[in-house]
Image (cartoon, coloured by chain):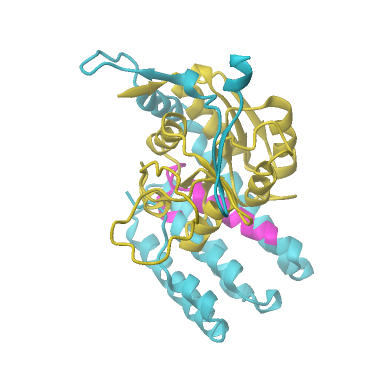
Chain colours: A yellow, B cyan
């Protein structure tokens, strides 16, 4: 069993809604975090990411200037910043399957559908800290390994040629989006 | 030298992909707890308690969100719909959808969700039915105010259901030639319900 020392983690919260930023800051301080930086849109978020080098990014999806998806794609540019591997938790009111898939394919590490709960947020942070997944780079993708499980009944072709990554078994993102924790 | 190596990602290269194990910078925050060890700090409970201390402000915040939504609706009625003011209306509705339950107004969220669907899935902006937008905005305001006064949720649930039904009928008709959009409209929401 592990516990997280939140006092050793720095968060960047990006949300255009001041009420939601206040709620997130309150929850994170409640967990024990001291350093919580905030930004109110994707552009300011990218600037804050570069400036503060946070350990974990929590971002909304729908925001002005550029949104959480575009922000994720910018962060997941190898060589473009100091930490393209930073865990990104997408916290959003979007709750459709295609949105979860799109977030996963953009390189989001965890997905949390609103309404937010302390337990749901804690579980996402615990997962990115205690169970980090390897990154995969292909011609069309750079981000956390999207394979969260191995299916012994899978009968199709192996799409990764030449070798396999170790699969860090986790609940599929779609299933996690359906539950609070 | 060893510190330098610890900061490098381990890369395994295969035919069409690379597997990268980045340096685990967050390891510093992981503490192993022995089985049976006494834990005197429950971070979730403490965060919930901290959030509860904000609860006195939630009604005010909800009212502010409603005012914002109302202003977005009025801007469209005053000057006609544009991509910009449609986006402002969507984000106002979307924020209410995501926050209403946290603020103690869970019955508002389904109506805001229906409004988001209406805005998002109406294929041509000028086709957005403003009377139906009005009904959603007015319902959100009414349920918010009745919620504050502690009225029953049954009427709110019926109203939300009816608005969702009318919205879905409209969207299915408008997107009858767009199978991908139709699938998206008809697929269930992933929003947590517990």
**Closer to the camera in the image, A151 or B56:** A151
Query: What residue lies at 42% left-to-right and 31% top-to-bottom?
Result: A126
Tell me residue A55's x, y (percent).
58, 27
**Closer to the camera in the image, B122 or B25:** B25
Which quadrant of the view contains residue B125?
bottom right
Quarter of the image with the C terminus of chain A is top left
Task: Answer yes or no: is residue B109 visible.
Answer: yes
Q: Is residue B99 magenta?
A: yes
Q: Give the range drawn in magenta.
A: B87-108
Give the farthest residue toward the left. Answer: B36
Which quadrant of the view contains residue A2?
top left
Tell me residue A140's x, y (percent).
63, 57
Q: Is residue B147 magenta?
A: no
Residue B117 to residue B171: above or below: above
Residue B2 to residue B136: above or below: above
**Closer to the camera in the image, A173 or A34:** A173
The chief SS type of the magenta part is: helix
Query: What residue lies at 40% left-to-right and 44% top-to-bottom?
Result: A167
Query: How many numbered dots are placed on residues in this image?
Result: 0
**Closer to the camera in the image, A136 or B91:** A136
Tell me residue A132's x, y (percent).
46, 34
Tell me residue A122's x, y (percent).
42, 32
Quarter of the image with the N terminus of chain A is top left
Query: What residue lies at 53% left-to-right and 33% top-to-bottom?
Result: A24
Residue A73 to residue A155: above or below: above
Residue A164 to residue A128: above or below: below
Residue A100 lies left or right of residue B46; in this view the side is right
Residue A90 lies left or right of residue B90; in this view the side is left
Task: Answer yes or no: is residue B111 visible.
Answer: no
């Amino acid at each position: 069993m592990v516990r997280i020392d939140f006092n050793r983690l720095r968060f960047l919260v990006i949300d255009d809604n001041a009420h939601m930023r206040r709620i997130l800051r309150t929850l994170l301080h409640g967990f024990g975090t001291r350093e919580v930086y905030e930004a109110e849109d994707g552009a300011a978020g990218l600037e804050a990411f570069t400036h503060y080098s946070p350990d974990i990014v929590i971002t909304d999806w729908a925001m002005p200037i550029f949104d959480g998806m575009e922000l994720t794609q910018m962060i997941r540019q190898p060589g473009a910043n100091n930490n393209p591997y930073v865990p990104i938790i997408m916290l959003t009111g979007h709750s459709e399957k295609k949105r979860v898939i799109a977030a996963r394919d953009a390189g989001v590490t965890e997905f949390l559908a609103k309404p937010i709960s302390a337990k749901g947020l804690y579980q996402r942070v615990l997962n990115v800290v205690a169970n980090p997944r390897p990154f995969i780079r292909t011609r069309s993708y750079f981000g956390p390994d999207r394979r969260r499980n191995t299916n012994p009944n899978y009968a199709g072709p192996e799409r990764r040629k030449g070798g396999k990554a170790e699969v860090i078994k986790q609940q599929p993102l779609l299933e996690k989006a359906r539950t609070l924790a | 030298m060893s510190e330098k190596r610890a900061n490098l990602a381990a890369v395994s290269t295969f035919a069409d992909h690379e597997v990268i194990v980045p340096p685990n910078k967050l390891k510093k925050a992981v503490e192993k707890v022995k089985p049976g060890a006494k834990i005197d700090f429950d971070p979730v409970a403490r965060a919930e308690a901290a959030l509860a201390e904000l609860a006195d402000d939630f009604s005010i915040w909800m009212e502010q969100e409603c005012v914002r939504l109302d202003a977005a609706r009025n801007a469209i009625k005053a000057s006609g719909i544009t991509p910009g003011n449609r986006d402002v209306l969507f984000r106002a509705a979307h924020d209410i959808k995501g926050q209403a339950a946290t603020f103690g107004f869970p019955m508002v969220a389904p109506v805001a969700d229906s409004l988001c669907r209406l805005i998002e899935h109406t294929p041509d902006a000028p086709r957005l039915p403003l009377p139906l937008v009005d009904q959603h905005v007015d319902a959100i305001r009414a349920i918010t105010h009745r919620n504050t006064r502690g009225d029953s949720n049954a009427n709110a649930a019926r109203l939300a259901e009816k608005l969702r039904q009318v919205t879905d009928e409209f969207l299915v008709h408008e997107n009858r030639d767009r199978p991908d959009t139709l699938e998206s409209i008809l697929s269930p929401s992933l929003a947590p319900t517990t």
